[in-house]
Amino acid sequence: MQQRHLQMIALAGTLGTGLFLGSGKAIQHAGPAGSLIAYCLIGSVVWGMIQSLAEMMCYAPISGGYIHYAERWLHPSAGFALGWMQWYSGVITLPTEIVSASIIIGFWDIDPVINDIPRSHLIAYITVLAVVCCLINFFGVRWFGEAEFVFAIIKILLILGLILAGLVVDLGGGPNHDRIGFRYWKNPGAFAPYPVGGSVGKFTGWFTTLLQAAFSFGGVESLAMACAEVQNPRHNVRKAARLLFYRILFFYVCGILIVGMLVPYNDSDLLNSTGDGAAASPFVIAFNRAGIKALPSIINAGVLSSAFSAADSGLYSTSRMLYGLALRGQAPRIFAKTLKNGLPIVALSFSTLFVLLSYMSLSDGAQTVLNWLSNLTSIATFICWCTICVTFLRFKAGCEAHGISRKDSKYFYNRFQPLPAYWAIFWCIVVVLFNGYQVFINGMWSTSDFFIAYINIPIVILLFVGHWVFTGRKRFPRAGELDMFSNIPGPEVDVDPNPATTKIGKFFRRVL
C-alpha cells in the first residue's frame, strides 16, 4: 500500500454505520449531553490506545501487528488468546456486515405487497456483495487499498455534508426555517434515563452508550495489520496515528453533537426505528422534518458504502490475523502459505468461507443464531484495547531494561506515556466488568443477556490457560528477557519510493 491508502484508512477506515445509524440509539439511551460525554470518553480511550500501539508499530513494523506484539512482549499465550479471539470476532462479524449491506440496498427495493425485500432479490444482493468483497481481497493488497481509499473519500464527504447540513437546519436554514438551536437540551433534557428512571437511570443510560460509542470506533486497531504492507511504514504510521486525533474530534465528537441538537431523545421516529437502513439515521429524521426529502437516498448510499467497506476490511484483517498466528506456530502452518506477491492465499481462502454464513439470514432460526454469535463479539473490542495497552507497558519496561531510549525515536514518542495507556486500561476494565449491569437490576434478569455480556472473559482465560498448559507452562518473561531486537526491520524500509518533487506535493506530505 502507498501512503495515501494508509492515511485514508486511518482517517475514515472504520467510519460507518456505528456513527451514521448507531448515533440515534446513543441519543435515545443517554440524551444529547450523555452521548456527547460518552463519545468524548471513548475517543480519549481510543487515543490512548493508539498512542501505545503506534509507538510499538514504529519500533517494529512487522506482520501480525498487535497480536505479535502481545506474543513477543507480554506472553506467548496472551498473543495466542488475543489472536484467536480477534479472528473469531472478525469472521463472525463479516457475514453480518454483508447482510446489513444487503438490507440497505433493499431501501430502494421494497415490494409493496409484502412490505419487505423479495427473498430472491435478497439472495442476489448477498451473493453479489460477497463475491465482490472476496475478489477485492484476492486481487491483493493494492486493490484493497484502492477500494478502501475510494470508500474513505465517500464516507468523509458524507459525514462532512451531514454535519454542515445539520448545522444549517439547526440554525433555521431548512425549508421550514425552524431554528432549533439547543432546544432539545432543555426539553426533554440533556440526559435520558435508561433503563430505569431518575438520576440513576441517567447514569446507567450514559454507561450503556459507552458500548455504542465503542462500536462506532471499533476496528481502529486494525491499522496495525496493514503496517507491514505499506511503503515507508514508520513514517506513514506516525502520520496515521496523528490523524486519528482530528478524526475523533471532527467526525465523531462534532457528529454526535449535531445529532443531539437535531433530534430529541424521546422522538417517536427514533424510538420506533428498526435500525436497518437510512430511516434509522437521526439525520434523516431531522431533514425530513425540515422538509428536505432527497437526502434519505443519499445517506443510504453512503451507509451502503460504509457497510460494504466494513466487510471488505474485516476480511482483510482476519486473513492477516490467521496468517500471523500461523507464522508464529499458533495456527496450522498451512495458513502461512503465500503467493509470490505475498498474498496469504490459504488464510484468506479459509476466512472467506465464513462469508457463506450470510445466507443464514434467510432463515429465521438461523438468523437468531447469527445475531447471538455476533453479540458475543461486542465486548471483545475492549479486551483487545486493554491487551494492547498492557503490552505497551511491557514494551516500555523492555526498552528501559535494554537501555533503549524511547525519546530518541525520530518517528513516534509520547511524553505523557504511560498515563494514556493506564487511562485506556482503566476504562476498558470498567466496561468489561460492568457491561452486563442491566441483568442485575431487579426484575431484568436474562440468562442469555448475562451469557452474551460475560462469555468472552472465560473464553479468553481458557484460550490463555490452554495454550500455557500445552506449551510447557512458561512464566511471564522479565523485562530484561524481552526480545527487543530480532527480526525487526532496520532503516532500509524507511524509504519513500515516490518522494514529492513539487512545493505543493511536499506541503501535503508534511500535513497529511
Image (cartoon, rainbow, N blue to C red):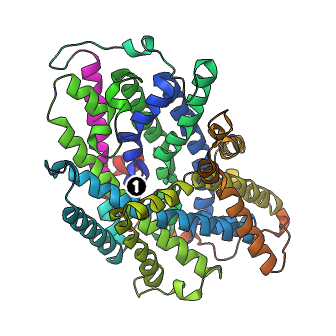
Report the magenta residues as a range.
149-172
Q: Nearer the viewer, residue 122 or 478?
A: 122
Residue 85 appears in the figure: yes
330 relative to 297 in the view: left or right: right
507 relative to 384 in the view: left or right: left
Give above or below for 500 relative to 346.
above
82 relative to 377 in the view: left or right: right
Give the residue at x 38% y 60%: 364
Give above or below for 66 relative to 414.
below
Name the residue tied to disc 1.
9
**Residue 211: % across, % down:** 55, 42
Dot 1 falls on a residue whose secondary structure is: helix
Q: Main secondary structure of the magenta part?
A: helix
**Residue 359: % across, % down:** 34, 68
Residue 154 part of the magenta segment: yes
Residue 43: image quadrant is: top right
